[in-house]
Amino acid sequence: MEPLERAAWVQAVVAPVGWLVYVGLLLARAGSEPVVSVQYWDLVAWTIGGAVVVSMVANMVLGGSDGTKPDPRDREIDGRAQQIGNSLLVAGALAAMVLAMFDVDGFWIANALYLTFVLSSLLTSIAQIGFRRVGVPGW
Amino acid sequence: MVRPPTRVTNRIKDLRTERGVTQAELAARLGVTRQTVIAIEQGRYSPTLELAFQIAHVFGARLDDVFGYSQEEQ
């Protein structure tokens, strides 16, 4: 497997797992209290930071980079996948704006954005894997 | 059968076989990964014009001796 495809697989697993860990810790901290009243920002920071570290370690353990620089195909795949992932970021930003317009608690806006980042990362990874396995469609 | 995502066809595999060039050697001469050479050969990636000219140059062939374009509807 290409190192860049392996990195995409790692990202596809680590990002959603990191978010699920966050939700689990958040619910555990809330206990019987309303989840909105729970301090969440430190959990967000720790799970994002943890996901970055786990991704780096997983990539090293699974073989690391083979030292080759990205070639035009790698750059095209990366660009196309980022475009697809970014479309979800735009949708998430719009959702957060709508929540803010309706004076929804900041907890939900922050969590909607966090979920958007996770889903965008997941979609980007899936697109990268798909383009590598199936092929890169012409413009 | 899964259709290739590009209509660009090529004879790279035939030319490699004729000249005894491996995918790894071709990749090294082009400065790309072996996976990229495989993807081009299998029609999973349409190379940039610049890369297509480089490939033709490696084989000492004209561009349309290496690459073709299928007019059939996908």
Image (cartoon, rainbow, N blue to C red):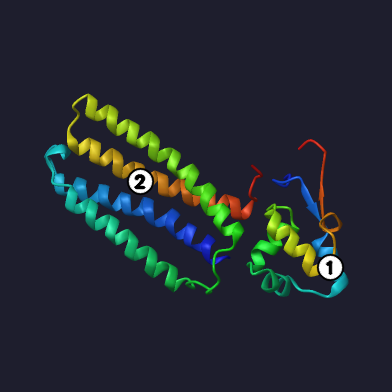
Residue highlighted by disc 1: B60
Residue at 72% across / 75% down in the picture?
B25
Relative horizontal placement of residue A123, taking residue B73 as reference (left or right): left
Q: CA distance from mark 1 to mark 2?
A: 48 Å
Query: For the residue marked with disc 1, what is the amino acid?
Result: Gly
Residue highlighted by disc 2: A117
Residue A88, image quadrant: top left
- Mark on residue B32? none
Q: Position of residue A38 (x, y in %)?
A: 13, 43
Q: Position of residue A64 (x, y in %)?
A: 47, 72
Q: Position of residue B45 (x, y in %)?
A: 68, 53
Relative horizontal placement of residue B19, taking residue A103 as reference (left or right): right
**In the image, is residue A96 above or below residue A23?**
above
- Select label 1 or label 2 by which is in front: 1
Query: For the residue marked with disc 2, what is the amino acid?
Result: Phe
Image quarter of the N terminus of chain A = bottom right
For the residue pair B72 and A15, the one nearer the viewer reads as B72
Relative horizontal placement of residue B53, taking residue A43 as reference (left or right): right
Say what secondary structure mark 2 lies in.
Answer: helix
Residue at 29% across / 55% down in the picture?
A48
Question: Which chain does the numbered disc 2 sit on?
Answer: A
Say what secondary structure mark 1 lies in.
Answer: loop
